[in-house]
Image (cartoon, helix red, strand yellow):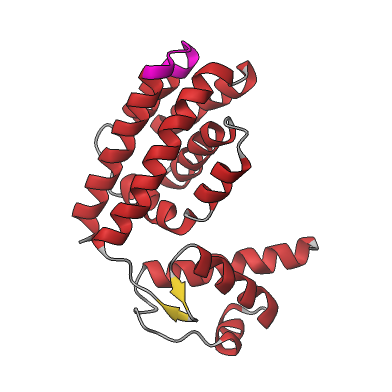
């Protein structure tokens, strides 16, 4: 893909995802590629690719907007909890010094940054830990959940979930100290707190 086509795809993906998550595109709405392409200002190809990606992530089914239930959200997030808890254990063993420093920087930005910067730092924090597994199946599984993860991330950051960055700090410290069991436990508790907070806020 060219840089231009990647940008068009990213623009289409972000637009459609946000329209669904904010309710601008209500559940059951049939998505019309031509109409969306005109609204976004791109061709139909990136819109089609964005819809395909959102189908993988569970927000669209048969070109209609789905509306995940509490049970759907909980089931998806519980898979993430299992995978990322394990990833934290691996990171505590194998993460390089350079990446440990970047992980610590994510914590610093989480405390001091703007909401947009905190969103980016939060995403990078978790991405570093997942990538530490060097397991493409695990990475791909998490990637397929990105819309739901984004929804939860946006909720905890903008609604200022208590202790969010303190928990990142503790996870980071456990990884720095090579405390595998502690890192795994802390990540599990961190994501469970995200889930409980988001289900309360979103519903």
Left or right of residue 56, residue 189 in this image:
left
Q: Residue at x 52, y 56 (%)?
A: 144
Q: Residue furthest top?
A: 177
Q: Is residue 175 magenta?
A: yes
Q: Residue at x 22, y 46 (%)?
A: 196
Relative image position of residue 138 (x, y in whole percent): 54, 42
- Above or below, 117 relative to 105: below
Q: Residue at x 43, y 13 (%)?
A: 179
Left or right of residue 26, residue 196 in this image:
left
Q: Is residue 116 visible?
A: yes
Q: Is residue 104 visible?
A: no
The quadrant of the rendering that contains the C terminus is bottom left
Comparing 38 with 192, the one in front is 192
Quadrant in the rendering for residue 110: top left
Q: Residue at x 56, y 20 (%)?
A: 100
The quadrant of the rendering that contains the N terminus is bottom right
Relative image position of residue 5 (x, y in whole percent): 74, 67
Q: Main secondary structure of the magenta part?
A: helix
Region of the chain picked out in magenta, as a range: 173-181
- Above or below, 149 relative to 47: above
Comparing 127 with 62, the one in front is 62
- Above or below, 93 relative to 28: above
Left or right of residue 118, residue 158 in this image:
left
Relative image position of residue 92 (x, y in whole percent): 50, 19
Q: Is residue 130 magenta?
A: no
Q: How many marks?
A: 0
Q: Residue furthest right?
A: 2
Quadrant in the rendering for residue 182: top left
Relative image position of residue 19 (x, y in whole percent): 43, 72
């Amino acid at each position: 893909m060219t840089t231009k086509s990647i940008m068009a795809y990213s623009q289409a993906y972000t637009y459609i995802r946000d329209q669904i998550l904010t309710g601008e595109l209500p559940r059951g709405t049939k998505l019309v590629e031509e109409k969306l392409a005109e609204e976004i200002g791109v061709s139909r190809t990136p819109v089609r690719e964005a819809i395909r990606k959102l189908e993988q992530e569970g927000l669209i089914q048969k070109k209609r907007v789905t509306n995940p239930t509490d049970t759907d959200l909980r089931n998806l997030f519980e898979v993430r909890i299992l995978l990322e808890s394990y990833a934290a254990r691996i990171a505590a063993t194998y993460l390089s010094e350079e990446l440990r420093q970047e992980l610590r920087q994510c914590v610093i930005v989480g405390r001091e940054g703007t909401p947009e910067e905190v969103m980016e730092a939060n995403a990078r924090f978790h991405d570093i830990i997942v990538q530490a597994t060097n397991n493409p199946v695990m990475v791909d599984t998490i990637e397929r959940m990105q819309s739901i993860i984004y929804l939860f991330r946006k909720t905890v950051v903008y609604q200022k979930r208590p202790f969010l960055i303190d928990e990142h700090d503790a996870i980071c410290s456990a990884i720095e100290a090579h405390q595998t069991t502690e890192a795994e436990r802390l990540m599990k508790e961190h994501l469970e707190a995200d889930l409980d907070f988001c289900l309360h806020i979103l519903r």
